[in-house]
Amino acid sequence: MSQLNDLPRPFTRFAAQPYTPNIGAVIHGLDLNQPLDAATQEELRQALARHEVLFFRDQQLTPAQQVAFTRTFGQVAEVKAFFPRLEAHPEIEVVESTAERPSAASNWHADITWREQPPLGTSLYAQVIPATGGDTLWSSQTQAYERLPAGLKTYLETLTAVHTWEISGWTEYLLRKDASGDELKAARAKYPPVEHPVVRVHPITGKKILYVNPTFTSHIKGLSRSLSDALLADLFTRAQVPEVQARLQWAPGTLAVWDNRSTQHYAVGDFFPQHRKLHRITITADKTF
């Protein structure tokens, strides 16, 4: 293990130890239950854009302190509907799996890309961690794009994809919840499909991002269904290779913050019936890109 003084120091307020060569960094030298000055917060925003997911170990945070720290990166808002929330802190969703209710988001996705302005990012703080399993993986969509052949990059930059929650399993969930179909109709009216460029540009780094994911991207406009399905299947696979991934083994006191613009993530569902509980805050912005 590297000592703190041996770590790369592109930042002045903390050390960012690369987690893998292509994505992620462990942040050393900050106690997140203390207020951070403006210069430290700006460096953290730059670190998040550069490394795409940041890991903070051995942090002892109250819910209020997690909310305060998360505001370093943007606004916090109630943008999801299917997870319970802390009564005293409705910004915090409780992501929990128990023996009676096992669950995990065991699919590659970026959060809520079916909105015109998707979330900027997320902070996720460990509460109860299984003895084994329950890791989370992140995939760099910046690296996925950079590894594409030059001709394919040029072609993809001309394309637009359609994103919708209806292909993600939420349709079935709403029908189970309300067999009349009224809730499904209301959700369709409130959240129609949206369009995003297949290749987007990160507003801080200026790097290009492969902006499709298998959970919410339904098809590419202007292509036949067979051609769209084939192209998307190829693009999804390029984000699922280990070279562009970081895999976190959770521990009590671990906080992860990721950039939802430039990553996908996957919660590994290999720990049932063990108990796993995390506190999640979604980071938003008036304009994501």
Image (cartoon, rainbow, N blue to C red):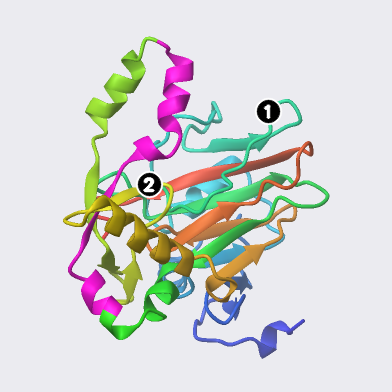
- 259 sits to left or right of 277: left
Whether residue 280 sits left or right of residue 183 in the image: it is right
Q: Nearer the viewer, residue 289 or 272?
A: 272
**Closer to the camera, 189 or 72?**
189
Q: Nearer the viewer, mark 2 or mark 1?
A: 2
Q: Please tell me in which quadrant of the rendered image residue 180 appears.
A: top left
| Residue 63 in the image: above or below residue 60 | above
Disc 2/disc 1 C-alpha distance (Å) = 24 Å
Magenta range is 152-179
Horizontal and vertical percent for residue 128?
A: 74, 43
Query: x, y percentage for residue 67?
Result: 50, 46
Res. 10 mark: none
What's the amino acid at mark 1? Arg
Residue located farthest toward the top when viewing the structure as drawn = 180
Residue drawn at x 50%, y 82% is 11
Whether residue 283 is in magenta: the answer is no
Is 18 above or below relative to 159?
Answer: below
Instruction: Say which element carries label 2.
Output: loop
Image spot of residue 13 (x, y percent): 53, 77
- Position of residue 249 measured from the top left corner of the image (x, y, whole percent): 71, 60
**The C terminus - image quarter:** bottom left
Q: Magenta stretch containing residue 163, yes or no?
A: yes
Instruction: Name which residue lies at 45% across and 26% down.
Output: 172
**What amino acid is labelled 2 in the image?**
Phe
Q: Which residue is mark 2?
A: 216
Q: What residue is rendered at 49% in x and 73% in y? A: 51
Please tell me how many numbered marks the rendered image carries: 2
Farthest front residue in view = 226
Mark 1, residue position? 101
